[in-house]
Image: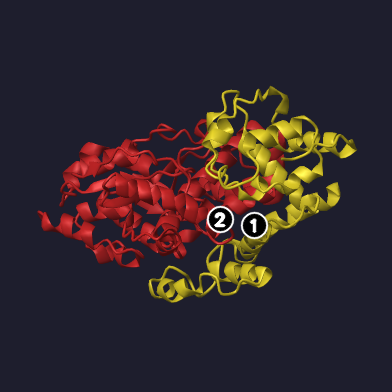
Chain colours: A red, B yellow
Amino acid sequence: MRYAYYPGCSAESTARDMNQSALAVARALGIDFEEPKGWTCCGATAGHQTDRLLSVALPAANLAKVQDMKLDMVVNCAACYNRMKVANHEIAARSEIRQGVRDALDRDYDGSVRVRHLLEVLLEDVGLPAINKSLKRSLNGLKVACYYGCLLVRPPGVVKFDDPENPKSLDRLVTMMGGQSLDWPCKVECCGGGLSLSRTDVVVNLTGSILDMAVQAGADCIAVSCPMCQSNLDLRQQDINKQFGKNYRMPVIYITQLLGLCLGFGPDELGFEKLMVPAANVLKKVEANGHE
Amino acid sequence: MLTIKKKKTGRALKDAVEALSGVDLSVCYQCKKCSGGCPVATLTQSRPSEIMRQLHLGAGDELLASDLVWTCVSCETCSTRCPMGIDVAAVMDALRRLAIERGAPKPEGNVPLFNRAFLKTVETFGRSYEIGMITAYKLGTGKLMNDTEKFPAMLKKGKIALLPPRGGDRKTVKRIFKKIKERKGAKA
């Protein structure tokens, strides 16, 4: 299985752990990743809030590079995934956008590169039975609140990822690994996304209620697949505690970190030391039941 | 509560939003599902359904100063749940672009400045560069000390890159920004 892997800017800064664990998981499962040479930023939220053509041309520059590689594009960051999908959609649907992109890139791109999220590759291409066969450890009943956020599942007509109101992709992986995926109401609530610096008050309000619900559901940790969700729930947890007089110590872990543990990698190979809220409870539970 | 004054600019705002977003504002029948699902509606004075109605009724550029315009987190819940399939999030994007173009007052937190700082690093390095962006944004807002207590831990954990990103195809990205500026210049 060979794919063009687009890491996204956060893979080189706030979400090195996301990238590190995704690469480890891919290696263990025989997924072959090739980075598009010279990949660039997708423009993220700032792009689409500023200019429509800019918000399509920035992802399209990468999609065009992947088209030359004749591979499907795999994206792990939910925000980049969303922007790539929207760009494809707009280019295919509107000739004037395609023309504008051609002018901006100095080449034509038709919107046809297949964009996949890493979760889709794991569930659809590798498949749960094959992953299950490679497991070296179990989550041993770890209670996990699976959190999908916005950009992975919305807008559903464009991203076409799972069920937009009650997605199950993360839950299926957690259950397969021997964890207990919790029924809780915040799966697709918003964390505040890119407003972390500019409107910290909004982010703290939104993540505060998500954390509160995860605690009430009895979660040992929250599993995520988006670097903005991770950062807003993990890095902002001390602000949330201060603002609401709480003492949350809820680890917010990438699904690829959990999967990496179960595939036999050590925490240091998966970037666990980079979490702001330590996941000692998770490591204890998982490693205590190791069957290497 | 926003008072709608019928004047020439009102029609222009509605038309501009419809042209930019591709949304037909007249199909909204005010079921308020967008406001019900909006994660920030309890934190703002204005709600998505009110913005839709005010636009349709011919509100003028004063609408661009509504706090929802820049508090909206682009989560797309409104567009996902609209029974008429209206892309409400695209309407919000259109309002933001128009707020920049028409010089609407700076919103709380100055999100437009944040976006400019972010995109400037992308234009320069081909990829976003957090330290560059944060510095430009903090200098612009004057709130230099916010969040500084998190920096040492983030640096230690390698969660923030000291040096600008390398390896991105800067030439193509610069060309994209140049072409976008040329188009804007041609339109204005």
> Which residue is most to the right?
B8
Give amino acid for label 1. Answer: Val
Q: Which residue is the site of mark 2? A: A195
Residue at the (17%, 43%) spot, across then down: A133
Measured as percent of width and height from the top left, residue B101 is found at: 79, 51
Please name whichever residue, A219 or A137, is drawn nearer the observer in this view of the structure.
A219
Density class for disc 1 (Cα within 10 Å; few <14, some 14-19, many ≥20) is many
Q: Is residue A63 above or below residue B81?
A: below
Indicate the secondary structure of the residue bearing disc 2. helix
Visible in this render: residue B92? Answer: yes
Q: Is residue A21 left or right of residue B184?
A: left
Please name whichever residue, B6 or A112, is drawn nearer the observer in this view of the structure.
B6
Marks 1/2 in contact by CB < 8 Å: the verdict is: yes
Measured as percent of width and height from the top left, residue A175 is found at: 23, 40
- Tell me which chain the residue with mark 1 is part of: B
Image quadrant containing the N terminus of chain B: top right
Tags 1 and 2 on a common chain: no
Q: Which residue is the site of mark 1? A: B111
Please name whichever residue, A213 or A65, is drawn nearer the observer in this view of the structure.
A213
Q: Is residue B162 left or right of residue A185?
A: right
- Tell me which chain the residue with mark 2 is part of: A
